[in-house]
Amino acid sequence: MMRDVRKYEVYQLADQLVLEVYSVTGKFPKAEMFGLTGQMRRAAASIPMNLAEGAARAGAKEFAQFVNVAVGSCEEVRYQLHLAEALGYLTRVEQQTLDGKYESVKKMLAKLYGAVSREP
């Protein structure tokens, strides 16, 4: 069953957060372009990308696997936000705001994983 991932609230929120990560990492030092900047951007984009790829798969089991990978990417971004704040690249307010949004995405992904896992 093909799903239209664009209708999922978690996909929409994750997509918005990718844009926010691109915006804040644009202010990081140029020396980080191939370090933390690139890592954060890839991890953030990985969340909606995995949802899109999983939604295109035929079965619920495969979709659930991609949702689970998205959860891992979400946690990766959350650590990177902590690191960026510790290095002085983000203010505490920026870090906490984005971290809270990623916590919301993680909770939504957990609910989606539970629902998809119960599908036949």
Image (tube, helix red, strand yellow):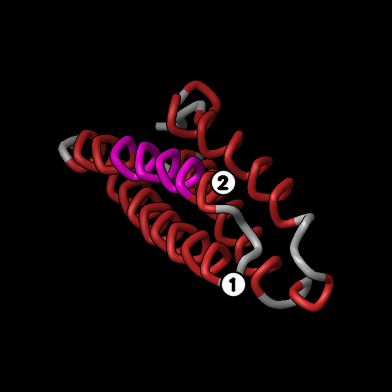
- Kindly report the distance in space between the C-alpha atoms of the residues bearing marks 1 and 2: 13 Å
Q: Residue at x 45, y 47 (%)?
A: 96
Query: Which residue is denoted by mark 2 in the rendering?
Result: 94
Q: Residue at x 69, y 50 (%)?
A: 24
Percent x, y for residue 27?
A: 78, 56
From this view, report whether residue 49 is shown above or below residue 107.
Answer: below
From this view, report whether residue 79 is shown above or below residue 48.
Answer: below
Which image quadrant: the N terminus? top left
The three-letter amino acid code for the residue at tag 2 is: Glu
Which image quadrant: the C terminus? top left
Percent x, y for residue 65?
A: 33, 55
Percent x, y for residue 87?
A: 59, 72
Sooner in the amino-acid sequence: mark 1 or mark 2? 1
How packed mark 2 is, by other alpha carbons closer than 10 Å (few <14, some 14-19, many 20 or more), is some
Left or right, 27 with respect to 119, comes to right
Q: Residue at x 69, y 77 (%)?
A: 35
Left or right, 32 with respect to 118, comes to right
From this view, report whether residue 111 is shown above or below residue 93.
Answer: above
The magenta stretch is: 96-108
Query: Which residue is denoted by mark 1 in the rendering?
Result: 87
Percent x, y for residue 76?
A: 45, 64
Secondary structure beneath label 2: helix
